[in-house]
Image (cartoon, rainbow, N blue to C red):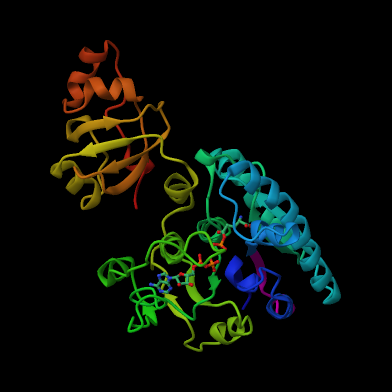
Amino acid sequence: MTKTIVVKIGTSSLTQPETGQLALSTIATLAETLSDLRRQGHQVILVSSGAVGVGCARLGLTERPKAIALKQAVAAVGQGRLMRVYDDLFTTLQQPIAQVLLTRSDLVQRSRYLNIYNTFRELLGLGVIPVVNENDTVAVDELKFGDNDTLSALVASLVEADWLFLLTDVDRLYSADPRSVPDAQPIALVSSIKELAELQIQTGAQGSQWGTGGMVTKISAARIAIAAGVRTVITQGRYPRNIEKIIAGEAIGTHFEPQPEPTSARKRWIAYGLVPMGKLYLDAGAIAAISQSGKSLLAAGIKAVEGEFDTQEAVQLCDREGNEIARGLVNYNSEELQKIRGCHSREIPQILGYGGAETVVHRDNLVLT
Ligand SMILES: Nc1ncnc2c1ncn2[C@@H]1O[C@H](COP(=O)(O)OP(=O)(O)O)[C@@H](O)[C@H]1O
Ligand SMILES: N[C@@H](CCC(=O)OP(=O)(O)O)C(=O)O
């Protein structure tokens, strides 16, 4: 049966750790594997990092730049080279590819989000493998995916993929970073988001020298993907052929089982496409109402309001400590909410001088995260 497969490969797998030069044999095997999957009838998307790493190698820089402008310039050098290498390899295998560069702001506007969806669908329908990366050269800090693990999960969610493979430089997820904790325990299967929380995985501070997110961004990517119904696997990038074995049922890497009832596409856009502009701190009653009873959020349950936002923008709904429980689109702006927080809905017209929605976040626009 045709499957939609998203494969994300990180800088640590695409480049050689000692020199920063491209790991050509890995990239060639990856191109062969993905072309074979296409020939078997599957739809394939590659999310590839490496623009900054390859740009550095090209320019003789020995470490990842920290200054934003330099990083953006280096990415512009590297992205072109990276695509050249991919196109040479895939062309040899008679597999057409396309470059898709995205920024976070492309997902925020619903019309652009749907446009990207349509473009992916066309490309996949044409038998093309889209090669996706963040458009590092134009991305601004506030509107950044920041790491391609998150980007790949959002792409997998957008196209409603069957599989997301996060290829990295360790063979699977461990209870702690195996580089610094030698007796860290390997994890083969995570069967639910709840189990993921219970495992209390230690991820250390950072990833490898060239990677950006480390394991922490892979775990949050897995969380996004499984909520969208995408089976997610963390496995070693050095052996791309394992992708076929895993699809055939071999227990390689760490598997995250998809949630049986995926969140709807619109709610996924609210939760992960939009950038939250503020925070609402809720009391215990409101938390129970939204998380256990599936109710809308009323003004009475809001203890505090943080940030400046407009009506219909996304906000985080948090407990008293600021831990996020849900996200939603607000029916009131931040100024109005400062006035009506803690009040009964029937008092709203009197306080504001005009009538408004009965709910602050309607349950149709509210998604537990
Ligand atoms: N719990 C963990 N299990 C496995 N690896 C971990 C864990 N915590 C941290 N890591 C580190 O994460 C690194 C991979 O992240 P990163 O360098 O960002 O890779 P990539 O470039 O593939 O995105 C590994 O090299 C490993 O040292
Ligand atoms: N967009 C950046 C990659 C950012 C990133 O997530 O890197 P990595 O942790 O190696 O997957 C680049 O192409 O260099």
Which residue corresponds to the image point at 41% horizontal and 63% vertical from the top-left? 216
Q: Is residue 327 left or right of residue 133?
A: left
Look at the image and say whether residue 174 sits in the magenta stretch.
no
Please state which of residues 244 and 23 is positioned toward the viewer in this rendering: 23
Please state which of residues 242 and 313 is positioned toward the viewer in this rendering: 242
Which residue corresponds to the image point at 41% horizontal and 26% vertical from the top-left? 310
Please state which of residues 161 and 145 is positioned toward the viewer in this rendering: 145
**Quadrant in the picture for the N terminus:** bottom right
Quarter occupied by residue 181: bottom left
Q: Position of residue 232 (x, y in %)?
A: 48, 71
Q: Is residue 86 left or right of residue 147?
A: right
Vertical side of 56 occupied by 113: above or below: above
Q: Is residue 224 left or right of residue 167?
A: left
Q: Position of residue 268 (x, y in %)?
A: 45, 51
Quarter occupied by residue 301: top left
Give the extent of the magenta segment: 37-46
Which residue corresponds to the image point at 72% horizontal and 49% vertical from the top-left? 76
Quarter occupied by residue 280: top left
Look at the image and say whether residue 45 sits in the magenta stretch.
yes
